[in-house]
Image (tube, grey):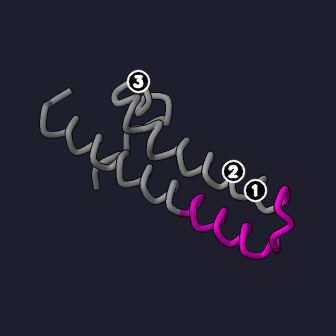
C-alpha cells in the first residue's frame, strides 16, 4: 500500500487561487449572506440554516474533488 503525502489547503490556494476561492469562499459567503438576509427580513432561520448547511457541504465536497484533481495532476506530471 502506498503512503499518503500530506496535502494542505494552502497548497491548493497557491496552485490554483481562483478556482480554490470560488469553490470554498464563494459558498461560505453565500451561506453567510443568506443568514444575514433572513435576519434582516424576518424569514425563518430554519430555511436559512438549511441553505447554509447545504452550501457548506458543497464547499467541502467541491474542495475534496479539487484536491483529488490536483493530486492526480501532480502524480501525472511528476511534480
Image quarter hosting the C terminus: top left
Q: Secondary structure at mark 1?
A: helix
Q: Residue at x 81, y 70 (%)?
A: 43
Would residue 53 appear left or right of 70 to someone viewing this image?
Answer: right
Q: Kindly report the secondary structure that dominates the magenta region of the rendered protein.
A: helix
- How crowded pointer 3 is (Cα within 10 Å; few <14, some 14-19, many 20+) is rated as few
Circles 1, 3 touching at the beta carbon (< 8 Å): no
Image location (x, y in percent) of residue 3: 34, 46
Magenta segment: does it hold 42?
A: yes
Image quarter hosting the N terminus: bottom left
Image location (x, y in percent) of residue 42: 86, 66
Can you identify the residue that label 1 sits on?
A: 37
Can you identify the residue that label 2 sits on?
A: 33
Q: Which residues are magenta?
A: 39-57
Which label number is shown at residue 2?
A: none
Would residue 77 appear left or right of 38 to someone viewing this image?
Answer: left
Q: Residue at x 27, y 47 (%)?
A: 69
Relative vertical location of residue 29 with respect to residue 74 in this rendering, above or below: below
Image location (x, y in percent) of residue 65: 36, 54
- How crowded pointer 1 is (Cα within 10 Å; few <14, some 14-19, many 20+) is rated as some
Q: Residue at x 55, y 51 (%)?
A: 27
Circles 1, 2 touching at the beta carbon (< 8 Å): yes
Q: Secondary structure at mark 3?
A: helix
Q: CA separation, marks 3 and 2?
A: 26 Å
Q: CA separation, marks 1 and 2?
A: 6 Å
- Report which quarter residue 20 is drawn in: top left
Of labels 3 and 2, earlier in sequence is 3
Between label 1 and label 3, give the one nearer the viewer.
1
Can you identify the residue that label 3 sits on?
A: 14
Image location (x, y in percent) of residue 72: 22, 45
Amino acid at each position: 500500500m502506498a503512503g499518503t503525502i500530506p496535502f494542505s489547503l494552502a497548497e491548493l490556494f497557491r496552485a490554483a487561487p481562483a478556482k480554490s476561492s470560488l469553490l470554498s469562499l464563494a459558498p461560505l459567503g453565500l451561506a453567510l449572506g443568506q443568514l444575514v438576509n433572513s435576519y434582516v427580513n424576518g424569514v425563518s432561520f430554519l430555511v436559512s440554516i438549511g441553505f447554509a448547511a447545504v452550501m457548506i457541504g458543497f464547499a467541502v465536497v467541491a474542495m475534496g474533488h479539487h484536491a483529488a484533481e490536483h493530486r492526480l495532476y501532480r502524480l501525472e506530471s511528476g511534480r
